[in-house]
Image: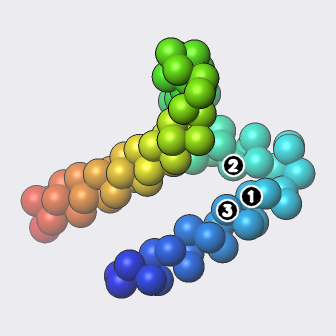
Amino acid sequence: MEKNEKKKIAVGFINDIRTMEASVLNALILREAGEDLAQFFLSYSANLISKDPSRILENSSSLMLMGYLIRAHEERRRFVWSGAQA
């Protein structure tokens, strides 16, 4: 997938979740991440932001990118694992 296409998909998804009802977004989070991972991210984010509140913008961006990189890593692992099963 090209970088421009990735950006378009990311922007579209962010726009979608910005307009979701809280209950729908919460259900999506629980379905995709689960309660344990959601709590981990909350704790990690709170810890990171509390260390230097003046860098909240940079830290927020870093957290979003970290989530993206985790998903990319999951996809690579899934692809390698399923390829090994073939």
Mark 2, other Cα within 10 Å: few <14 / some 14–19 / many ≥20: few
Residue 66 in the image: x percent, y percent? 41, 44
The residue drawn where x is 56% and y is 68% is 10
- Is the residue under label 1 in contact with that under label 3 (CB below 8 Å)? yes
Q: CA distance from mark 2 to mark 1?
A: 10 Å
Q: Is residue 24 left or right of residue 41?
A: right
Q: CA distance from mark 3 to mark 1?
A: 5 Å
Residue 54, quarter of the rendered image: top right
Q: Which residue is mark 2?
A: 28
Residue 67 in the image: x percent, y percent? 46, 46
In the rendered image, the quadrant that contains the N terminus is: bottom left
Q: CA distance from mark 3 to mark 2?
A: 13 Å
- Is the residue under label 1 in contact with that under label 2 (CB below 8 Å)? yes
Residue 47 in the image: x percent, y percent? 52, 16
Q: Which residue is mark 1?
A: 17
The residue drawn where x is 69% and y is 49% is 28
Q: Amino acid at mark 1?
A: Ile
Label disc, if present, on residue 14 of the rendered structure: 3
The residue drawn where x is 44% and y is 83% is 4
Q: Nearer the viewer, residue 12 or 77?
A: 12
Q: Nearer the viewer, residue 78 or 60?
A: 60
In the rendered image, the quadrant that contains the C terminus is: bottom left
